[in-house]
Amino acid sequence: MHRRLTLACSVVGAMVVALDGTVLTVVQPALQRDLDASFTAVQWTSTGYLIAVASLLVFAGRLGDRYGHRRLFAVGTLGFAAASAGVGCAPGVGWVIALRVAQGIFGALLQPATLGMLRAAFPPDRLGMPIALRTSAIGLAAAAGPVLGGALATHLGWRFVFFLSVVPALAIGLLALLVRVPEPPRPGPAPGLDLPGAGLLAVALACLVHTLVGLPEAGGPAAPVAGFLATAVVCGAFVLRERRAASPLVPPRLVGSAAVGPALAVLVAASAAMFGALFVATYFLQDVLELDPLGSALRALPLAVAMVAGAPLGAVVLRRWGARRTVTSATALLTAGVLALSRLGPDAGPLATGGAFLLVGAGFGTVMVAATAVVVRHAPVADAGVAGGLQQTAMNVGPALGIAAATTLMSALASTTGPQGPGPRWSDGEFLSAMGPTLTALAALAALGTAVAARLPRGTPPRRDADPAAVSGPPAPRPPSAA
């Protein structure tokens, strides 16, 4: 019974955060008009949230390891609900930005906990399907978010969009707080918090995300170079700190394992390729094919359908094939889908676009399930929160990297006659001349994920849930049927 409750909380919590992220883009124009805000201020409603959540995910995961994932999940969901309600009542755009940052902080608390609770409740060889259900819920939220957000904003106003997540977040937050679920015994003393390391990592991730988000609008190379240089310096200081810390924030036994590092790299590459391709394809559908937002959403619907339906299938394939074959096949499928998008032209019909989106969704959904399962499985229970935080960090950095790369390449490869950023200022020929090479570059990034996936273990780790040393080396050989 407690496993079902944990799974329900994890799935709904992940879905609430994903839904909130997808509906925001739909209502930003209405929010800007109603609050008489500038375009830059409205952009910070997204950027502020992204920086807050990305910079705190790993530290929030460590807080869950120390104080309990259920407690952190309850605090995160209840705080997220309160911040969402506050955004809906905000009198000005400054309040919206501040409350969106608060949402990012509480979202950072609850997101690693959704994976940490699963790791504590399920044995390693049974994690695939719970993670697949969680992935399907995220895909469903991504598909339903724009439709729900558009309907609410049209008939009730943009404020009601932020009330959408309040009730489910309150429900699961109170449920996690009031219902006692047995937790596995701690294998040793409570891990330290390593506040200096947490601060350095937060600054490094904030610099990286801020640089990536601002890269397409940078007037010259000076600002991006300074941002990446600052990120590298702080990352170097973080690595030195972790090597000397008695209780490091990111244990070497975790990131030094043969599975976790490659799995995280695959997640970054796959999410960058997928979100960058989706960004360019959206402009293709609306500017070249001249579809309205609803029509373009329907053309891209196979992507979400493939994610929702393919995630459970990916869990089955993971058990039968093992991590290496599953992830390499899925990244190859994602690469093929992005390449198919790069070959679309002005006469592309629903079959061609739908088939390309189907490949992208099926490949990416399977990568999410399999690579996430590898990260969580190979983490001991004592480090489950940190593992969840690293996975969520990869899933935040990857899309920012992909969209920045897509926008930068499009701006460099197509003729410019107006403001920066792909859009109606280009003729169809100019846009298509840049779209092909841009998507090919993103496909190459997905193919790089395929090469990295070849380093993953073949099967699943043995069931040594409480042994932190179990993840320091490769898993013991197991029969193929046990994978």
Image (tube, rainbow, N blue to C red):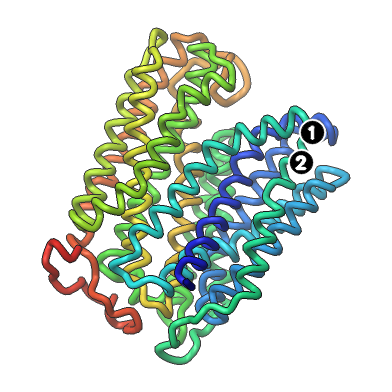
Image point 51% across, 44% down: which residue? 400
Q: Position of residue 368 (x, y in %)?
A: 38, 50
Amino acid type, residue under disc 1 in the picture: Leu
Left of 205 or right of it: where is 94? right
- Is residue 322 visible from the viewing direction of this image? yes
- Is residue 203 visible from the viewing direction of this image? no
- Residue 156's tag is 1
Residue placed furthest toward the right = 91
Image point 65% across, 65% down: which residue? 173
Spatial separation of the CA atoms under disc 1 and disc 2: 6 Å
- Within-10-Å neighbours for mark 1: few <14, some 14–19, many 20+: few
Q: Nearer the viewer, residue 356 or 32?
A: 356
Quarter containing the C terminus: bottom left
10 vs 465: above or below: above
- Say what secondary structure mark 2 lies in: helix
Rendered image quadrant of residue 92:
top right
Mark 1 vs 2: CB contact within 8 A:
yes
Residue placed furthest toward the bottom = 189
Image point 72% across, 45% down: which residue? 162
- Within-10-Å neighbours for mark 2: few <14, some 14–19, many 20+: some
Q: Nearer the viewer, residue 221 or 339?
A: 339
Q: Position of residue 48 (x, y in %)?
A: 67, 50
- Say what secondary structure mark 1 lies in: loop
Q: Which residue is mark 2?
A: 160
Image point 49% across, 37% down: which residue? 403
How many numbered discs, if any?
2
459 vs 161: above or below: below
Q: Position of residue 393 (x, y in %)?
A: 48, 57
Amino acid type, residue under disc 2 in the picture: Phe
